[in-house]
Amino acid sequence: MAAEEAHLVEAVREATGGHGADLVVETVGGKLLQDSLRRLAYRGRCVSIGAAGRGQGNQVDLSSMRHQNQALVTYYLGAELAASTRAYVLIGELLAKVASGELGVLVDRRFSLAQAAEAHRYAESRTAVGWVLLLP
């Protein structure tokens, strides 16, 4: 495990009092999905909802999950949107909760548009915890 990956695993453990994450929602796939599985608590669940890191490969080692009673679930929004209106309703409810302040969004750092290169380097460093925003 690389130093930055170990740092993120340790940061999750520290933030949870050594427990680990009960739920990880992972959107990149590949190597980051594997790293996300390392952050899970006993009986933790990981929901993989994307493959933004398409070039990272798809091989994931699930062997360590069994003795921790952990679960990996995949979700493809495109299939859900084609199957019914359920996803549209749920997305609308979530957006309303964000708009009302009931549901928050964690923002790690904000960068001006003039700092776009720095923002991209920071986002690609995989040390961000939350969104990295570019502001006009």
Image: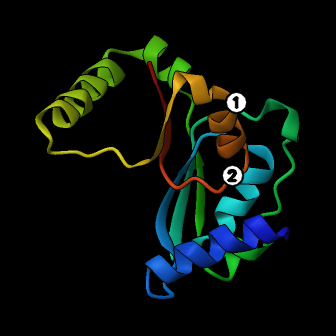
Please provide percent x and percent y for residue 123: 65, 42
Looking at the image, can residue 69 be seen?
no
What residue is rendered at 38% in x and 49% in y? 106
- The quadrant of the image that shows the N terminus is bottom right
Colouring of the image: rainbow
Q: Are marks 2 and 1 in contact (CB under 8 Å)?
A: no
How crowded pointer 2 is (Cα within 10 Å; few <14, some 14-19, many 20+) is rated as: few
What residue is rendered at 67% in x and 37% in y? 118
Residue 116 quadrant: top right
Q: CA distance from mark 2 to mark 1?
A: 15 Å
Viewer-proximal residue among 31 and 134:
134
Q: Amino acid at mark 2?
A: Arg
Please provide percent x and percent y for residue 37: 66, 64
Viewer-proximal residue among 87 and 17:
17
How crowded pointer 1 is (Cα within 10 Å; few <14, some 14-19, many 20+) is rated as: few
Q: Which mark is residue 62?
A: none
Q: In the image, 77: left or right of 122?
A: left
Q: In the image, 75: left or right of 86?
A: right
What residue is rendered at 11% in x and 35% in y? 100
**Residue at numbered disc 1:** 117
The earlier-in-sequence mark between 2 and 1 is 1
Please provide percent x and percent y for residue 44: 51, 70
Residue 22 quadrant: bottom left
The answer to whether 133 is drawn above or below residue 41 in the figure is: above
What residue is rendered at 22% in x and 35% in y? 98
The answer to whether 135 is drawn above or below residue 94 in the figure is: above
The answer to whether 133 is drawn above or below residue 6 in the figure is: above
Viewer-proximal residue among 80 and 46:
46
Q: Which mark is residue 126?
A: 2
